[in-house]
Image (cartoon, rainbow, N blue to C red):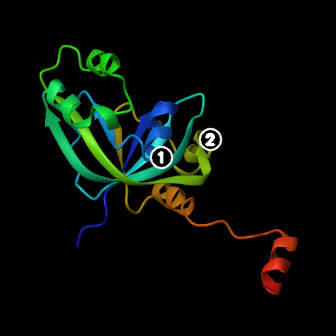
Amino acid sequence: MNAPHNFLISLEERHANRILQGTKTVELRRRTMHVPIGSTVWIYVKMPVGSVVGCAKVISLHTLAPSTLWSRFGPVSGLQRQEFFEYFSGLSKAFALGLSEPIRLTSPIPLSKLRDVSNGFHPPQFFANVASDGPLLREMSRALLPKRLTSPRREMVLELA
């Protein structure tokens, strides 16, 4: 049985926020990404944020002419028409990664922490595979777990409830 596939992409903050809000359901790329459907894509926001902020599930892969991609996904691409076509200018094929189930981390993981847990870590230019048994995935997965309530006052209220 294969372990779930995880990979990391670097995005501008505006695109990451739209994915995590659920209004951008495709990530556009000038090159095809060969990733399995069902993979988890972890979202690293470029500097000045410099943190992993969330993740989503890959539900589809689309390699199409830019005009066809726009027809199908323009409203959920996070781009205006002109920006979309400028991005894909000169290409006969464009790529869209279909995403669902976005989750925003309650505590983003800063670049310094990523480098502490994974020696030599550098944010990817395109995308990077994340080892299923590695420290990077353990750290990111840990950030998905709910935080324990540590406030004594909050614990008292819970006990009374």
Task: Name the residue beneath numbered marker 1.
Answer: 20
Please name whichever residue, 106 or 135, is drawn nearer the observer in this view of the structure.
Answer: 106
Please name whichever residue, 133 or 34, is drawn nearer the observer in this view of the structure.
Answer: 34
Q: CA distance from mark 2 to mark 1?
A: 23 Å
Mark positioned earlier in the residue sequence (2 or 1): 1
Which element is circle 2 on?
helix
Q: Quadrant of residue 61?
A: top left
- Disc 2 packing (10 Å; few <14; some 14–19; many ≥20): few
Q: Amino acid under label 1?
A: Leu
Q: Which label sits on residue 112?
A: 2
- Disc 1 packing (10 Å; few <14; some 14–19; many ≥20): many
Q: Residue furthest bottom?
A: 160
Horizontal and vertical percent for residue 84?
A: 30, 22
Question: Residue 147, relative to residue 28: is it above or below?
Answer: below
Please name whichever residue, 74 or 101, is drawn nearer the observer in this view of the structure.
Answer: 74
Horizontal and vertical percent for residue 149?
A: 74, 70
Q: Nearer the viewer, mark 2 or mark 1?
A: 1
Q: Which label sits on residue 12?
A: none
Residue in view at x 20 percent, y 36 percent: 72
Q: Quadrant of the C terminus?
A: bottom right
Residue in view at x 46 percent, y 57 percent: 137
Q: Is residue 55 left or right of residue 51?
A: left
Q: Amino acid under label 2?
A: Ser
Please name whichever residue, 104 or 34, is drawn nearer the observer in this view of the structure.
Answer: 104
Horizontal and vertical percent for residue 117?
A: 56, 52
Residue in view at x 18 percent, y 14 percent: 90
Which element is circle 1 on?
helix
Q: Is residue 34 left or right of residue 4?
A: left
Q: Quadrant of residue 152?
A: bottom right
Horizontal and vertical percent for residue 1?
A: 22, 73
Question: Residue 152, relative to residue 27: is it above or below?
Answer: below
